[in-house]
């Protein structure tokens, strides 16, 4: 999704983050115009960064993980415990969009937590843009405003000076567009081209 959004919408940016807020919370990282995977492909596991002061159990076995506190499924569980009919992140998004007070409060609190975690990453990595996607991302007035507040309130001024925080323009298509771009880059790479010509000659 990060690659798709970068190639289709922000091709001129060298450094950006794509945050997906659904049942869990993940982060795709673009560094120097390229997808950053890390040494073992685990880069961007934002959802398991600990939120200070929180001790909610997480499915990973730790407590206080961002996903367990602010992920879409966590919000659905919180609302269900209060008697609100919500089983998934999409339910939370729908309720909040319809103006349900409890759903909007839950999303607002989650956005603040996400923003505070991202503030540390902004200070550390200094991206040019943060793009937010996933089922909760369209709640711009609640989710993005809370994320912005968390980041702008804690990130270093220099690190956020040129930072843009936007909603995904591709929405659910971002992953497909990124997969196509990844396949094209692989096929047209130094190693991929000889294989392509070899296949065509055999045909």
Image (cartoon, rainbow, N blue to C red):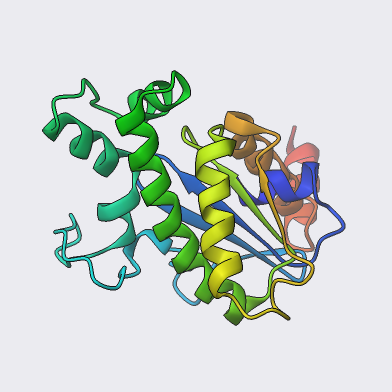
Q: Specify the farthest residue to the right.
A: 12
Would you place residue 105 above or below residue 14 in this image?
above
State the count of labels: 0
Where residue 2 appears, x then y in whole percent?
A: 63, 51
- 55 is higher (above) or lower (below) than 203: below
Q: Nearer the viewer, residue 40 or 152?
A: 152
Q: Could you tell me residue 46's position as x and y percent?
A: 42, 63
| Viewport quadrant of the N terminus | top right
What residue is shown at x 29% (from left), y 73% (from top)?
A: 52
Answer left or right for 192 relative to 88.
Answer: right
Q: Position of residue 10 (x, y in %)?
A: 80, 50
Residue 174 lies, with reference to residue 51, above or below; the image says: above
**Residue at the spot x=69%, y=79% of the render?**
157
| Residue 138 appears left or right of 95 | right
55 or 44, nearer to the observer: 55
**Could you say where residue 149 lies in the image, as x and y percent from the top left?**
55, 59
In this picture, residue 201 sits left or right of residue 69: right
Q: Quadrant of residue 62?
A: bottom left
Q: Going 36% across and 24% down the picture, which residue do you hit?
A: 100
Decide which of 27, 193 is in the foreground and name it: 27
Q: Could you tell me which residue is drawn at 61 percent across and 32 percent down?
A: 171
Q: Viewed as shown, does residue 187 lie left or right of 29? A: right
Residue 91 visible in image:
yes
């Amino acid at each position: 999704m990060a690659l798709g959004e970068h190639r289709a919408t922000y091709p001129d940016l060298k450094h950006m983050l794509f945050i997906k807020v659904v049942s869990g919370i993940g982060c795709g990282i673009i560094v120097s115009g390229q997808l950053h995977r890390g040494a073992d492909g685990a880069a961007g596991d934002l959802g398991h960064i600990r939120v200070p002061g929180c001790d909610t159990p997480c499915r990973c076995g730790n407590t206080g993980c961002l996903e367990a506190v602010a992920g879409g499924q966590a919000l659905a569980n919180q609302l269900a415990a209060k008697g609100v009919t919500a089983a998934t992140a999409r339910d939370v998004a729908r309720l909040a969009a319809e103006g349900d007070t409890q759903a909007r409060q839950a999303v607002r609190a989650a956005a603040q937590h996400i923003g505070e975690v991202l503030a540390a990453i902004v200070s550390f990595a200094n991206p040019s843009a943060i793009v937010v996607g996933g089922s909760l991302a369209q709640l711009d007035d609640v989710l993005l405003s809370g994320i912005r507040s968390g980041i702008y309130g804690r990130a270093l001024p220099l690190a956020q000076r040129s930072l843009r925080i936007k909603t995904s323009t591709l929405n659910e298509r971002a992953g497909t567009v990124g997969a196509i771009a990844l396949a094209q880059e692989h096929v047209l790479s130094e190693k991929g081209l000889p294989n392509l010509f070899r296949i065509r000659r055999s045909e």
